[in-house]
Amino acid sequence: PASTTLAEFRKEVPLGSGQRVIAVEQADQYVGMLLVPELHSDRSDGDTPVSALAQFKDAVLVPSMNVQTAAETFQRTGAEELAVVEDFDERIVLGLLTESHLMRRYAEELDKARRDLSGEG
């Protein structure tokens, strides 16, 4: 939960266990992205709630977004990964999307469309 303290977070999520954790409040509502290496090197007081250290608090993706809008969100925020939420109001977390995965899948679909148009498919 987003109310977890920095000290608790460091115990529960050891350095090297992953690169990022999505911080949520009750009912899985998105709060922000926690970058594990940064939280382990942060000099904040151990009693600081991780929600205060979360990044990309206002940057989320929704399933209805097209590739261009999602790519623009990545570009605008400078994030390598963003949370996917149900909608902008409730912000219930559905998952995580990396920019590299988005671009790889987009390139695959473009290639497939090109092959279909040229009769290679």
Image (cartoon, rainbow, N blue to C red):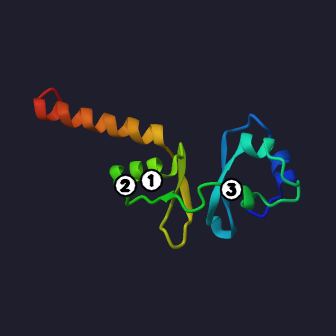
Asked whether disc 2 touches disc 1, contact meaning CB atoms under 8 Å apart, the reply is yes
User: Quarter of the image containing the C terminus?
Assistant: top left
Of labels 2 and 3, earlier in sequence is: 3
Instruction: Using the image, determine if residue 38 lies above or below residue 77.
Output: above
Residue at image point 66% right, 45% down: 20
Label 3 is placed on what type of residue?
A: Ala
Circle 1/circle 3 CB separation < 8 Å: no
Given contact means CB atoms under 8 Å apart, are the residues at marks 2 and 3 in contact?
no
| 16 on left or right of 119 | right
Q: Earlier in the sequence, mark 1 or mark 3?
A: 3
- Crowd class of label 2 (few under 14; some 14 to 19; many from 20; radius 10 Å): few
| The N terminus lies in quadrant | bottom right
* Residue beneath disc 1: 73
- The residue wearing badge 3 is 54
Looking at the picture, tell me which residue is in the foreground, 74 or 117. Answer: 74
Q: Specify the farthest residue to the top.
A: 120
**119 or 110: nearer the viewer:** 110
Query: How far apart in space, not on screen, are marks 2 and 3 (Cα)?
Result: 23 Å
Spatial CA span between label 2 and label 1: 6 Å
**Residue type beneath disc 1:** Thr
Across and down, in percent, residue 8 comes to 85, 53
The image quarter in which residue 26 lies: bottom right
Which residue bears the numbered disc 2?
Answer: 69
Residues packed near mark 1 inside 10 Å, few (<14), some (14 to 19) or many (20 plus): some
